[in-house]
């Protein structure tokens, strides 16, 4: 900073001067009108009398800090880091804090190192969290288990800056030594949390482990309890899990809480980004819910910067890096220009300079020697010698949420087999283990998903990402799984023996190499085919991806069978009297 003093004192010209615009002050929550001087990528002056080699007229616009996403998963966008940067930087996002536990599950440490290498030299700062839960629980099967030793390696190598979401919350509050060794490995680092429906003494015990934020709050009551106990609130607005509308009244009625709250995206799809943007979309939606524009801005800039101790950004102020966005208005949140460290990187929704795609030479390996189940292996028969009609446990989905309910239902039986029943909105769910190549297969049933016919198969199944297929008949399910295997990962939609649409995801079975526009064209084909099979569930793909996530209550299906983490673990298919 000493080298910048002369520019700050107006004794020599700066590199860039933003002139004539008003800027949003997230310290005092007010608008100011002043020129902003930038030297060597740092804001060195605010006021009048500055000169610069380049002067930009910002009259009529609103200048804000670059947006920060405090919790997300790059892999969920189907894009590699480079293609994601090319997509969200023109929208005003300049920093993200991803947890790479998706690719860590499918490709281990090799996958994490790939993500870090692909994130260098971008007009987007990417600070990764060390995956804390690979596997997410003992009911999931990743490529390799990441230990406390691995976490220390990621910190020592500079690949990760904080601990990714600690999802195995029961083992935190129960004192599991292996889980606590990971928390100890992150001592002195920010530890991000994941505590759905956790409250009372168990929540307090969880906080003792070090997690200091949560993005799994669905109600104002739960959010307030966590805030009162000292946690930071992450208001999530993802493609499937959307809590902004439920939690916005809390912020609207007490905007002081923005000092401990931020907006995050978590899991977002290409279509979701195309429809509503990234963090700029969160700002618009918070404003639509009655949160003041400046409070919404703070939740996407200064608050996440403070939480992650990124004291060099998040505000327009002397000494902060010049991550700056010129908007038409904060309410519309349309980016006219985006500067990264004082360099213009995007204008009117387009990059100034293109970003090269992912380096295929660095693609991590993805196991493909998986024995696909035979048709009879996905068939379900009632218990032998059953005296009365059996009852089965069924996953009850909730639209717009990743949590599920555990339902007990009488199954539909045809020709001696328990089958899916579209008339009752009961679909069959099949999970095939692929990461270790065992082909272990589990079968369950899902209610309220909306399958009318056919099947959807995917290698995106949080967090282990084994092959998952949901369908209305066994023929469609088998065809979808066989096609998915032949592709080595992706998404497939079938109707009987007919493949309606498919998308290949060659990078870890999670990401495409296609740029955003081409990717959206392909996902549009998936969406059209989905309407044939499942016309009423627009988020069918993302919802399917969460039906295997064992650390989200209540009932889920992994390759090891049913589990309900809130009820103690493994659960049977057939309800025991």
Image (cartoon, rainbow, N blue to C red):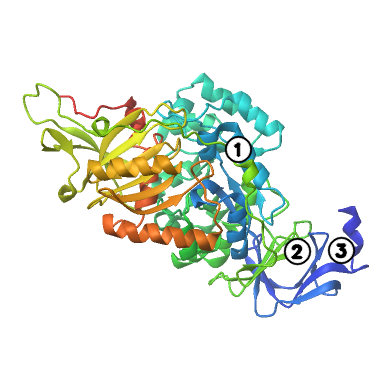
CA separation in Å, label 3 and label 1: 40 Å
Name the residue at 19% across, 49% down: 422
Judge whether 272 appears above or below 445 on screen.
Answer: below
Mark 2 vs mark 3, foreground winner is 2
Q: Which residue is mark 1?
A: 112
Task: Return the mark for residue 8.
Answer: 3
Task: Return the mark for residue 343.
Answer: 2
Neighbor class of circle 1 (other Cα within 10 Å; few <14, some 14-19, many 20+) is many
Residue 401 in view here: no
Judge whether 340 appears above or below 475 on screen.
Answer: below
- 480 or 527: nearer the eye? 480
Helix, strand or loop for disc 3: helix
Dividing the image into 4 quarters, which one contains the C terminus? top left
Q: Position of residue 130 (x, y in %)?
A: 60, 36
Q: Earlier in the sequence, mark 2 or mark 3?
A: 3
Q: Is residue 494 left or right of residue 44?
A: left
Residue 48 in view here: yes
Q: Quadrant of residue 356?
A: bottom right
């Amino acid at each position: 900073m000493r080298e910048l003093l002369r520019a700050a004192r107006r004794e020599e010209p700066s590199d860039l001067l933003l002139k004539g615009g008003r800027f949003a002050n997230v310290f005092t929550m007010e608008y100011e009108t002043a020129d902003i001087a930038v030297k060597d990528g740092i804001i060195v002056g605010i006021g009048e009398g500055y000169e610069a080699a380049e002067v930009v007229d910002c009259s009529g616009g609103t200048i804000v800090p670059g947006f920060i996403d405090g919790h997300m998963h790059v892999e969920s966008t189907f894009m590699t880091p480079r293609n994601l940067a090319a997509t969200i930087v023109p929208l005003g996002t300049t920093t993200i804090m991803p947890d790479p536990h998706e690719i860590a599950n499918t490709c281990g440490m090799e996958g994490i190192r790939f993500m870090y290498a692909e994130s260098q030299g971008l007009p987007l700062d990417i600070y990764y969290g060390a995956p804390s839960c690979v596997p997410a629980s003992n009911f999931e099967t990743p490529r390799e288990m990441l230990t406390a030793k691995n976490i220390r390696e990621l910190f020592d190598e500079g690949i990760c800056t904080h601990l990714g979401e600690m999802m195995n919350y029961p083992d935190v509050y129960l004192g599991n030594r292996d889980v606590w060794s990971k928390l100890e490995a992150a001592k002195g680092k920010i530890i991000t949390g994941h505590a759905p429906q956790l409250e009372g003494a168990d929540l307090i015990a969880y906080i003792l482990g070090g997690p200091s934020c949560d993005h799994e709050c669905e109600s104002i009551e739960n959010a307030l309890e966590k805030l009162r106990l000292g946690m930071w609130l992450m208001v999530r607005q993802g493609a499937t899990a959307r809590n902004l509308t439920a939690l916005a009244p809390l912020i609207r009625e007490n905007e002081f809480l923005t000092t401990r709250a931020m907006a995050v995206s978590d899991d977002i799809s290409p279509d979701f980004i195309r429809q509503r943007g990234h963090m700029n979309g969160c700002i618009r939606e918070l404003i639509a819910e009655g949160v003041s524009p400046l409070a919404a801005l703070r939740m996407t800039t200064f608050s996440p910067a403070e939480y992650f101790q990124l004291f060099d950004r998040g505000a327009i102020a002397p000494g902060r890096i010049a991550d700056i966005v010129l908007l038409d208005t904060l309410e519309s949140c349309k980016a006219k220009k985006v500067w990264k460290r004082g360099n213009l990187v995007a204008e009117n929704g387009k990059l100034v300079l293109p970003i090269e795609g992912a380096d295929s030479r660095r693609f991590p390996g993805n196991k493909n020697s998986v024995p696909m189940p035979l048709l009879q292996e996905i068939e379900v028969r009632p218990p032998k010698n059953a005296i009365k009609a059996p009852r089965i446990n069924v996953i009850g989905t909730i639209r717009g949420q990743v949590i599920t309910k555990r339902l007990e239902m009488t199954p539909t039986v045809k020709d001696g087999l328990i089958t899916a029943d579209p008339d009752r909105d009961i679909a069959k769910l099949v999970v095939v283990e692929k990461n270790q190549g065992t082909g272990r297969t589990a079968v369950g049933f899902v209610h309220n998903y909306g399958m009318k016919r056919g099947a959807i198969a995917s290698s995106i199944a949080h967090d282990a990402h084994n092959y998952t297929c949901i369908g209305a008949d066994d023929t469609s399910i088998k065809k979808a799984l066989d096609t998915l295997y032949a592709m080595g990962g992706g998404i497939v939609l079938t109707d009987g023996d007919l493949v309606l649409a498919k998308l290949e995801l060659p990078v870890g079975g999670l990401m495409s190499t296609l740029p955003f526009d081409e990717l959206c064209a392909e996902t549009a084909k998936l969406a059209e085919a989905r309407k044939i099979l499942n016309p009423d569930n627009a988020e069918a793909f993302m919802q399917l991806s969460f039906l295997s996530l064992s650390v989200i209550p209540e009932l889920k299906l992994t390759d090891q069978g049913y589990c309900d983490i809130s009820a103690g673990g493994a659960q049977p298919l057939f309800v025991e009297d």
